[in-house]
Amino acid sequence: MAKRGVKKKTRKLKAAMKRVRLYIGLCIYGLVNYITGWKFPWISINLALVYDRMGRIYRAARIYHKVIKLHPQDPRAYYGIAILYDNKKRYEDAITWYKKSINVKADYIPACFFMANALYEKGDKANALECYKKVIALDPENFWAHNNAGSICEELNMNVEALNYFRKALEIIPEHHRILFNLGVVYAKMGYDKKAQECYLESIKRYKKYPYSFLNLSLLYKEEKKLDRAILVISEGIRCNPGVPSLYYNRACFLAMAGNIEEAFLDVVRAARLNPEFLSYAEKDKDLESVRKHPGYQALKKYLQDREKRNE
């Protein structure tokens, strides 16, 4: 209890310090902006950023619009408005303002990169990929552009292109856990299971708080009928990431296949308590047929149904 209280006080102190820094920034940028008469756009843009971080987005938007009126050739204000829309998941509006920023300065990398993100979120993967390619042409060392381009290629089943992008990203930032994971996904899709396993293992070595490396590696071992190893890997994943329901659910499948019905049922309970949707998966999963016959299974269903009614 004492440790929890200390952590809570620490979080409150950090939040208070953040508010103080924001108000100091607001005072400084506001005063300088007033004295200089909006002469320097970067000061006005920093003021708008402070308002944005304080949650006063309409005030931030007003400042960006005034900067555009006074300094129409500065791409940062158009970009700032785009970010405001992007944060609200209004991707169509965000893309419109990203384009305005790029029209002012064709090689403005932040607008190109985040427009690619917005296009992807909108479902326009082809144009998102073209934007990432433009970012790579402007900034060949931008490893996230390589990574994101690779992810789109993987989704479009352009696996060779995806491999090339991920490999390039790793050249820029070697042994990054997310890129190693993505590379493993492509290798697995192409049937290179050993290489995929090596990537997942290296990803886990670099960062144990990314649960999907454990999950994908365990699924490869399952396909090889190495259930003991699959259970060992996913159990380590649960130890490092105890709040991820998909890990418990998949371990339940492995345990049920290995004949350990009691432990498998307990993992279904753990997964369903974290996310009740996993019980609907268990209803149809062939691997969990034996678990559905467990005497406690119907009680679990009723408990979750009652909990859902109470939350309505």
Image: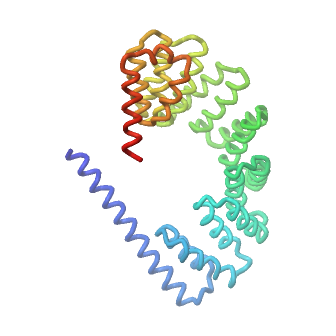
Where residue 275 sits, quadrant-wise, is: top left
Image-based side of 112 in relation to 276, left or right? right
Choose between 113 and 218: the one closer to the eye.
218
Image-based side of 13 in relation to 215, left or right? left
Choose between 79 and 276: the one closer to the eye.
276
Choose between 273 and 298: the one closer to the eye.
298
Q: Position of residue 4 (x, y in %)?
A: 25, 47
Q: Position of residue 39 (x, y in %)?
A: 62, 86
Choose between 301 and 177: the one closer to the eye.
301
* Quarter of the figure that contains the N terminus: top left
8 up-or-down from 45: above or below: above
In this rendering, the count of numbered labels is 0
113 up-or-down from 211: above or below: below
- Write the residue at 30% across / 55% down: 10
- Write the residue at 46% across / 80% down: 28
Q: Residue furthest left?
A: 2
- Write the residue at 50% across / 79% down: 29
